[in-house]
Amino acid sequence: MAALEKVQALIDRYALAAHPEGGYFREVYRSQRKVTRKEKSYSALTDIYFLLPHGSLSVFHRITAEEVWHFYEGAPLRLIQSDPGLSTLTETLLGDGEYKHCIPAGYWQAAESTGDYSLVGCTVAPGFEFEDLEIM
């Protein structure tokens, strides 16, 4: 199967939609359990499928919760992170011997596929809310 056909097959199979930071996603789990943080109620955790085709970037962004990235299939994913003050920049390659990586709350992060596509999952706790997403 050609790369573009594979990407479209994954979009169709998992009913993915365009994500504001780049790529495609679908939320697959949102905990019914609630937690309170800074006087606001959140789901205890959320989980998504996230697809980055070749040439598509997850632009630098940060959220107010911890995020664990899980590699599923495709080319290795280049995951870049920086502390909140932007004083250090580190890179992790998911899918090349490392299959999950945690981004601390408030850290900047960006990602790109190193090949035709990368299919990953992202688990956020407390749960993700778009209002907590800050794009650089």
Image (tube, helix red, strand yellow):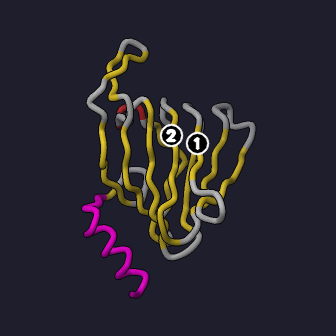
Q: Secondary structure at mark 2?
A: strand
43 vs 122, left or right, is left
Instruction: Write the residue at 42% across / 17% down.
Output: 37
Q: Amino acid at mark 1?
A: Cys
Which badge, 2 or 1, is on the more N-terminal residue?
A: 2
Q: Evaluate if marks 2 and 1 touch, with contact meaning CB atoms under 8 Å apart.
A: yes
Instruction: Write the residue at 45% across / 48% down.
Output: 122
* Residue 66 picture location, percent across and down: 52, 34
60 vs 37, left or right, is right
Residue at the outermost right position: 88
Quadrant of the image occupied by residue 114 = bottom right
* Residue 105 picture location, percent across and down: 55, 31
Q: CA distance from mark 2 to mark 1?
A: 6 Å
Q: Front-most of 5 and 85?
A: 5
| Secondary structure mostly seen in the magenta stretch | helix
Residue identified by numbered label 1: 102
* Residue 82 picture location, percent across and down: 66, 41
Q: Front-most of 112 and 2?
A: 2
Q: Front-most of 52 and 99?
A: 99
- For the N terminus, the image quarter is bottom left
Q: Secondary structure at mark 1?
A: strand
Q: Amino acid at mark 2?
A: Glu
Residues in magenta? 1-17
Instruction: Write the residue at 30% across / 38% down.
Output: 30
Residue 101 covered by magenta stretch: no
Instruction: Write the residue at 46% across / 37% down.
Output: 134
The dot on residue 136 is none
Category of crowding for the residue at label 1, using alpha-carbon neighbours closer than 10 angstroms: few (below 14), some (14–19), many (at least 20): few
Residue identified by numbered label 2: 67
Residue 5 covered by magenta stretch: yes
Compared with 70, 136 (above or below) is: above
